[in-house]
Each structure stands twice: as structure tokens, then as C-alpha cells.
Image: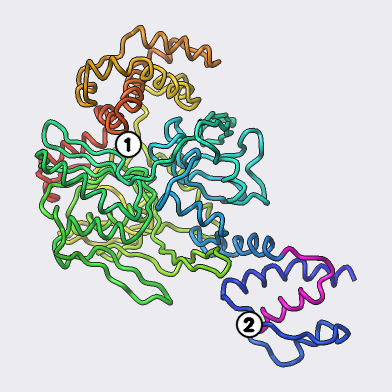
Amino acid sequence: MSDHRRGPSVFYPILLALALVVGLYIGRDLGSSSAGPLSIFQMHRPSASDKIGQVLDLIDAEYVDTVQKSKLVDEVLQDILQRLDPHSYYISAAELRATQEPLEGSFDGIGVEFAIQHDTVVVISPIEGGPSAAVGIRTGDRIISANGEPLAGIDITNDQVMKQLRGPKGSTVVVSIIRHGKAKPFDVSIERGKIPINSVAASFLGPDGTGYIKLVRFAKNTHEEFLAAANSLREQGMSRLVLDLRGNGGGYLNAAISLADEFLPTGEMIVYTEGVHSARQDAVATTDGGYEKIPFAVLIDEGSASASEIIAGAMQDNDRAILVGRRTFGKGLVQEHVPLPDSSAVRLTTARYYTPSGRSIQRPYGKDIDYMEDLEDRVGHGELFNVDSIPLDTSKAYKTLKGRTVYGGGGVVPDIFVPTDTVESSGYLSDLFFSGTLNQFSFDVADRERAKLMATYGTSEEFAKRYMVPAALLAELDRFAVKEKITVRPEESSRSRERIAMRLKAGIARNVWGDVGYYRILLVKDDAFNKAREVLLRTGGQIGMITSQ
């Protein structure tokens, strides 16, 4: 008897999940229960869909215990889809509403995009301008608890995670983080807030005519937001443009295509998609492009994924823009959103997308590959610091329109590599930043001196040019840190003094003038932005004039 009961407990949930995947439920009358469970299989040799429906009926009629079908199906279906590839997944009705909000609505929370991988909550990307980004949460961080409640284990669900991380604006949650390179977990206190949903986080014009646009997602209104920002900069005299896609995890495919169309002449390939069951579909540039001639650079890094990689790949393969930064994430799979009758949905990978040269930039995945560990592996083998450490699959070499060699199989490699910045870093700076202490102090200073700062400087541009962080304010920050139980280490404080001052200045600007003020200051010492700007000034955006990495 025990063996008879064990069979259904192991195999029937998987069959249940498959039933929903194929969207079939074949109901049949079992007749008298005395006929025994084997009788329904003896009617005829069942097809796969018949068998699924018959087993579902069998569970209803014969299973020894009451089965919570909806919960069982949700959990197993999620597991089945995650076995296919890293980006196919099932999402409940409640979770579906929540995940659509960053692209279509607004909400209160800590502001992270996450995935549950290997029973652990992994940060895919902190949402730019949100509370988590402000306190330094990074791509690849593992959130293992929230306010002491565990967020790891075989039973953890997206819904449970969101219930712990979301909450009313102004409330606080303490999350415990595991990060590569740190021996022990550490706690970060995050004050929940309104999560911004704009695609353009900041746009402004430099004194030399270089325009800057920071794009943080590809949502419904991305194209319109970009045009509004770019047109405004052009009216102010923009003569070249730097588009910042660093940390942009993607979004709507059509938004990326519309944006790419602005920069490419009529008829040029933007991207194409194709799968075993999906015929090839080409997206080509139309006559609508308004920025086809402007010298143009795109900033990318390991957090640039999906739609961001479509832009990067299209610009690189068409020799239209100079890519500056580090290798992108490597997501080249297309998901189809399939709604189910109970308002839940399946997002199933149905095709790969390919850049104009024919590259798939999807990096490898499978049962023997820890997909989410890739970012940590890049740190381990030195890729974030040295261009020669980037693994290139020479068997997947392709040519751009002008004959340059590019590679597929694992993200988009920039034309000009810029290593991650570790100058002036220290444990003290990390403690200030990740504890939220620096963010809180910046807010307090801005709050008490807002009127004076506005009267003295007027604009974020003037503030960026003229304001110098006083030594007395840095000393006050040290005293504030001690109150927050942070150990002030004089040697580390001295080494990071300039970086701490810059972060403090940027934080004050953000609290007074918004993200425009914040980015104006940070870009002053942003190596990737300054390299892109210098190359555009030197070459006029001509790809053939790039002589070195």
C-alpha cells in the first residue's frame, strides 16, 4: 500500500503542470469507483493529452488525501518552466499584476527586480532612482532575509518575497545580503518609497554640446520619453549624444526597436527573431528616424540586458554607434506572454533574437551551469578589470557592415573597454554607502539647507560647478556615522575622502534637484562617460577612427 501511495505523490504533480503548459484538460466520467484506477487506461492507448486529462480525473476521484490543486500546480509549473531555460516562468495572477507595474504603473517598495534561482532571491537589477539603488544594492546580491524572516528555501515564492519587501512609503525593512567577495552576510536598512517608473532617469546638455540621456528601462512610453528628452537637448544645441544603458535590464522588445529606428537609415536591419516553432521575423529601420546623423555612443555594462542588448547589437553591427564600457549580460531569448483563464500567465521562451550580423548574444545555460553565478565568475576571472580576460568564442565570429569582427554566444563586447572603478574604495566608504548612512546624511543636509542652496546656486548645473563640500561637513558625517554604529577608520576615510565628498555632493543634489543633479556630479569622474565623450569629440562618431580599446 505504501508504494501505491508514493507513486501519485511524486509523479502526478508533474503531470498536472504539463496539463497547464499545453492548455489541455480532457474530462472523462470514471464511472463506478469499484472499477479501479487502471480501468481508465484500458479504454484505449491514450495520447499524451488524453493521459494528462485522465490522470487529473483520477486524482479527483481516487487520491487518498485532499489536494490543494491550485497551490500544487503553481509550484510545480514554476519548477517545470525553470527547467527549460532561465527566462521561461509561470506567474500567478497577483504576481502578474505586480510585475507589470514597473512597466505600466507605480507602487511602493524597495525597488528591485529579482528572480528566485536555486531557492534564493537574486537581485537582477536595482531600479534606478529607487530606495535600493540609493543604498547600494547591486546586481547579483542574494537577499536571504527581510526583517528577520527567511527569504530562502525550497518553499519560497515570488509572492512571499514581494509581501516582505513591499510596504507603505516611509516604512523600513532590514534585508540581509550575501555578496560575492564578502565573507559574511550583512544587513542593509531600506526605507520603502515610491518606485519611479519613468524610462528616462536624467537628461542634460554639457557645455561642449554633448548630450546625455540615462535610460533605465524599456517600457510602454520609452520611445516617447526619449524623443521628448532628445528633442529638448537638440533645441539647446546638442551636437553629439551619449546614451547610458548601464544597469538597464530591458523590457518591451518593441520599445527597443522603436528607439533603434531613430538612429538607423531606412532599410537597415535592427533585429530578427526565430525559433523552432516561430518563423523568422525581421525588424528593419523605417523612414521615421530623427537622429540618423548625430555622433552617438552607448554606455553598457554587465547589467545591460535584453532590450538594451538589442540596441547595443544593432548599433554595433551597423557601425552606427561607439559602444563603451563592459560586456553585457547576455540575454538573447524572446518570451511570449500566454495568459491563462485564471488571470495567471506563462512566459514561455519561443524564439531567440539575433543581431543584424546574425549573432545570438544569449550566453550558455543548462543543468550543469549556474546561470546567475556568471556575474560573480566575471569578477573571479578578472573580466571587470581587464579586457583580455573577456572570454570570446572565436567559433562564433561575425562581421559588421564595415567588416569589423564581433562575437556571439555571450553578451555584447564593447568597442572600447572601461574597467570597473575601484579607485579610492575602502571598507569605510562601503559601510557608509551600504548602511544607508550616507544617503540619510545627504537627505538631512539637503533638507536643512534647501532654501540656502536654491538661493545660492539656483540650478543643479551651477551647484555642480561651484559647490565644494566643506571639511566641516565631512567631519560632521564622521560623527553621524559613529552615532549609526559605523566604525570610522582614519586611514580608509582619508583614502576615500574625495569619493565620499563626491557621493555626498551628488546625494545633496539629488534631494534638491532630482536625478539630473545627481548624474551631473557623478559623471564628472565617470570613466566610461568621459571616454565616450572624448572619443566622440575626437572622431566625430566615425567608427573607423577608433584606434585603441
Q: Quadrant of the N terminus?
A: bottom right
**Residue at 19 percent of width and 50 percent of height:** 321
The percent coordinates of residue 530 (x first, y second) are 21, 34
Q: Earlier in the sequence, mark 1 or mark 2?
A: 2
Is residue 374 shown left or right of residue 15?
A: left
Is residue 315 shown left or right of residue 492?
A: left
* Viewer-closest of 458 and 305: 458
Q: CA distance from mark 1 to mark 2?
A: 53 Å
Reading the image, the residue beneath label 1 is 419
Reading the image, the residue beneath label 2 is 48
**Residue at 45 percent of width and 58 percent of height:** 364
Taking 268 as reference, is 323 above or below it? above
The percent coordinates of residue 339 (x first, y second) are 50, 67
What is the three-letter code of the residue carrying label 2? Ala
Q: Is residue 208 magenta?
A: no
The percent coordinates of residue 334 (x first, y second) are 41, 64
Taking 495 as reference, is 21 above or below it? below
Task: Find residue 273 and report its image quarter.
Answer: bottom left
What is the three-letter code of the residue carrying label 1? Pro
* Viewer-closest of 411 and 506: 506
* Outermost residue to the bottom: 44
* Coloration of the structure image: rainbow
Q: Residues within 10 Å of mark 2 (few under 14, many from 20)?
A: few
Helix, strand or loop at disc 1?
loop
- Secondary structure, magenta segment, majority class: helix
Helix, strand or loop at disc 2?
helix
- What's drawn in magenta, residue-wise? 50-68
Q: Residues within 10 Å of mark 1 (few under 14, many from 20)?
A: some
